[in-house]
Amino acid sequence: MTELVATVASYDQAAALIAAGVDRLYLGEDYFGLRLPHSFKPAEIAEIVELAHKNGRKVTVAVNGIFHNDRIKKVAAYLEKMATIGVDEVSIGDPGAIYLLQQAQLNLPYIYDAADLVTSSRQINFWGKHQASGAVLAHEVPYQEMVPLSKQIEIPVEVTVYGAIAIHQSGRPLLQNYSNFVQEHLNKTDRERGLFISAPHKEETHYSIYEDLNGTHIFANNDLDLMLDLPKLWDLGLRRWKLDGLYADAGNFVKQVATFAQARDLLDQGQATTDALQALDQTVHELQPAERGLDNGFFDLDPNEVK
């Protein structure tokens, strides 16, 4: 069975996503998780867990931050809180956080999420041997490399099929540092400001950029859209698909998720024609923010071109 995972920006959106056909909700608090549409406190997470379980759905909480000494001290207590709440799974990439989870012997499965580091079946299987229930595949893995990988992995992998793709993170407040340097005041450097940067001598590039307590995050020109490539993922047995609504309109994101849910159902029923998927993809494009393009990222690239 194909599982659809979607990020959550509010309790109301969580309810709408469940109605749209999502199997698993993905959320967290920005002190512990990276690049989240909203930072939920534990009490708010508990409410969404209750909502999800009432409707037969699951919840994954992001604990995929890079934890320095000041923060790692708080991770164990947070994991214990998530276990108490009844979270179904956490996503973790920091080996120190995994160690704390295992030391606590909590009834709390984890999926290995180390961003662009997760590129090989050997690495995925290594973490599978260390109790990971799954792994999040790096966005930079093209289809040609997914083919052999899918035959060698021993635990499921999650593939992002829609949403903003981070291409760089710095722990430094780069925007604020720049503002200080030029002695100008940027009153907002968060995601809502809509800032972007361009590559030197490439005015057509518009890399979205924002700052939060985890540092500075830079994103690819376009959002990812693998609607037309879903049959290839399905055939490989890679059937846990994530949709990231970080830059999406809250209401339109629910509608976009609904189109992917329709595609999932068509594939599971053996009825996913090219025309049907193209019609659904057209809907995804129509609902996309005007300032953000769509493409299929690294999917069609020759592996030799990925550097």
Image (spheres, rainbow, N blue to C red):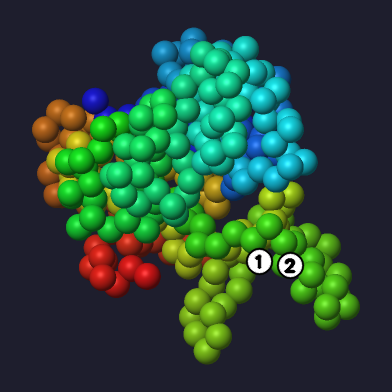
Q: Quadrant of the C terminus?
A: bottom left
User: Could you say where residue 294 lies in the image, as x and y percent from the top left?
Assistant: 39, 61
Q: Which residue corresponds to the image point at 49% horizontal and 10% vertical from the top-left?
A: 54
Residue 219 vertical position relative to residue 12 in the rendered view, above or below = below
- Earlier in the chain: of badge 2 and badge 1, it is 2
Query: Disc 1 designates what residue?
Result: 195
Residue 62 vertical position relative to residue 50 in the rendered view, above or below = below
Residue neighbourhood size for the residue with mark 1, other residues' Cα within 10 Å, grouped as few (<14), some (14–19), many (≥20): some
Q: Quadrant of residue 70?
A: top right
Residue neighbourhood size for the residue with mark 2, other residues' Cα within 10 Å, grouped as few (<14), some (14–19), many (≥20): some
User: Could you say where residue 127 lies in the image, as x and y percent from the top left?
Assistant: 40, 35
Q: Which residue corresponds to the image point at 26% horizontal and 32% vertical from the top-left?
A: 154
Is 226 positioned to the left or the right of 271 in the image? right
Which of 285/183 is in front?
Answer: 183
| Disc 2 and disc 1 in contact, CB within 8 angstroms | yes
Query: Disc 2 designates what residue?
Result: 175
